[in-house]
Image: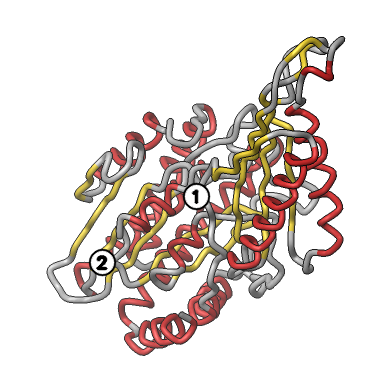
């Protein structure tokens, strides 16, 4: 066994405990004060210089630099939970897996050179911690960014959808429901807009996703609502097309407002997520590493699905977000069953396999200069 394998054998039970601890103490986005401190303290324990918080309220940055020149490998952590469900997206595993990978790579880095940066990235589910960090140039000193997401399969990457979140706020005139002719119903504007956007769906390009809810439709049946709101996510394979859908929806809302004698405001109420750029050189390298661990990982899924703030990172530096298997296909993401899978036998195996795969990939990127050059060349060409 090499040094990384020996280290992992010593640490696995401890890090399974961290996965369970975060599972038992879920925190929503931008409220992860306990979790961010826990993970930051782990990095300090194992010799990293840590700033917590760093640029945001609940982020952190752990750094370990060797005394030899070399590239900087970034590992991305997530750790926010979902309302009511808890860690139904498995973020309690993501942060722990990335940190364990960083600690394993640290066993070798003094000999091979380079640096390790571990980014604590809050609020992936809604407020886009990585989007904010990217705006603040947090990743500018790094050569690549690596992470793995829990899934029902091992995979070397997948495309994500760009996402534009829009809130439509309609303003009318309140009044007694028995004398509606004296009022203007903001709810009517919401209903007409919801219907219009639903009719728009059939004319959108494949891969586009539109989903919305009436977040405020009034408070009492006998009062004409003066204010009503409608929240939407517009997703598409590219940010350009997601913005096209948003603009068409705004036109529909403005038309509905005119039809019902209302005014309407549209606003971005959560973070805009860019689509994720795939670096196929990184994906191929991860596939080879998975194979060396006895894992037959699937190739990149080219069909965009959900959205992630990791897209913002992928537009700044070469980025890899692969997948690690914690459950079977019949378990849905964003569910309590998926959360439970993070602390299951498969979840424990994924922690072991995922952390070693990320550590080995970081090692390979440092020692194989040709590989790192190819990764960067592909990124430059893609941009």
Mark 2 highlights which residue? 141
Residue 69 shows in this picture = yes
Q: Is residue 201 left or right of residue 243?
A: right
Report, in whole angstroms, how far the alpha carbon at label 1 lies from the one at label 2: 22 Å
| Numbered badge on residue 232 | none
Q: Height in image: 377 above or below 10?
A: below
> Dot 2, how many residues are within 10 Å of its Cα: few (below 14), some (14-19), or many (20+)?
few
Residue 103 shows in this picture = no
Please name the residue shown 51% across and 41% down the image.
92
Q: Could you say which quadrant of the image residue 223 lies in?
A: top right
Whether pointer 1 and pointer 2 mark residues with C-beta atoms closer than 8 Å, the reply is no
Q: Nearer the viewer, residue 347 or 49?
A: 49
Nearest to viewer (mark 1 / mark 2): 2
Q: Position of residue 249 (x, y in %)?
A: 71, 52
How is this picture coloured? secondary structure
Q: Nearer the viewer, residue 226 or 75?
A: 226
Q: Is residue 12 left or right of residue 257?
A: left
Please name the residue shown 87% across and 10% down the image.
178
Q: Could you say which quadrant of the image residue 81 lies in?
A: top right
Please name the residue shown 38% across and 29% down the image.
34
Q: Height in image: 208 above or below 193?
A: below
> Dot 1, how many residues are within 10 Å of its Cα: few (below 14), some (14-19), or many (20+)?
many
| Quadrant containing the N terminus in the rendered view | bottom left
Q: Is residue 230 left or right of residue 359?
A: right
Q: Position of residue 228 (x, y in %)?
A: 69, 28
Sequence-wise, which precedes: disc 1 or disc 2?
A: 1
Task: Give the SS element for disc 2.
Answer: loop
Task: Give the SS element for disc 1.
Answer: helix
Mark 1 highlights which residue? 94
Q: Position of residue 32 (x, y in %)?
A: 42, 33
Q: Residue furthest left?
A: 67
């Amino acid at each position: 066994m090499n040094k990384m394998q020996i280290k992992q054998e010593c640490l696995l039970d401890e890090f399974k405990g961290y996965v369970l601890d975060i599972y038992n103490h879920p925190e929503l986005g931008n409220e992860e004060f306990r979790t961010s401190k826990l993970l930051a303290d782990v990095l300090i324990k194992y010799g990293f210089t840590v700033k917590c918080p760093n640029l945001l309220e609940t982020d952190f940055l752990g750094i370990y630099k060797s005394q030899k020149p070399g590239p900087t490998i970034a590992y991305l952590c997530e750790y926010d939970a979902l309302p009511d469900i808890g860690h139904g997206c498995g973020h309690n595993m993501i942060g722990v897996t990335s940190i364990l990978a960083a600690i394993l790579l640290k066993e070798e880095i003094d000999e091979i050179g380079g640096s390790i940066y571990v980014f604590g990235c809050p609020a992936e589910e809604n407020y886009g911690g990585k989007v904010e960090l990217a705006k603040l140039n947090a990743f500018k000193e790094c050569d690549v960014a690596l992470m793995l997401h829990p899934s029902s399969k091992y995979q070397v990457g997948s495309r994500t959808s760009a996402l534009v979140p829009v809130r439509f706020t309609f303003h009318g005139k309140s009044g007694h429901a028995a004398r509606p002719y004296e009022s203007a119903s903001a709810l009517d504007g919401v209903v007409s807009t919801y219907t219009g956007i639903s009719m728009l769906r059939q004319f959108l390009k494949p891969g586009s996703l539109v989903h919305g809810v009436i977040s405020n439709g009034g408070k009492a049946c006998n009062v004409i609502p003066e204010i009503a709101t409608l929240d939407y996510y517009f997703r598409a394979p590219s940010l350009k097309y997601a913005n096209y859908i948003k603009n068409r929806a705004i036109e529909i809302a403005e038309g509905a407002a005119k039809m019902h004698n209302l005014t309407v405001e549209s606003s971005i109420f959560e973070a805009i997520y860019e689509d994720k750029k795939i670096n196929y050189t990184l994906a191929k390298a991860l596939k080879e590493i998975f194979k060396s661990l006895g894992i037959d990982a699937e190739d990149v899924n080219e069909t965009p699905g959900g959205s992630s703030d990791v897209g913002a990172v992928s537009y700044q530096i070469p980025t890899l977000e692969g997948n690690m298997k914690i459950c079977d296909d019949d378990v849905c993401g964003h569910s309590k069953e998926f959360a439970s899978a993070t602390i299951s036998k498969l979840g424990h195996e994924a922690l072991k396999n995922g952390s070693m795969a990320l550590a080995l990939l970081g090692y390979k990127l440092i020692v194989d200069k040709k590989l790192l050059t190819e990764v960067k060349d592909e990124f430059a060409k893609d941009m």
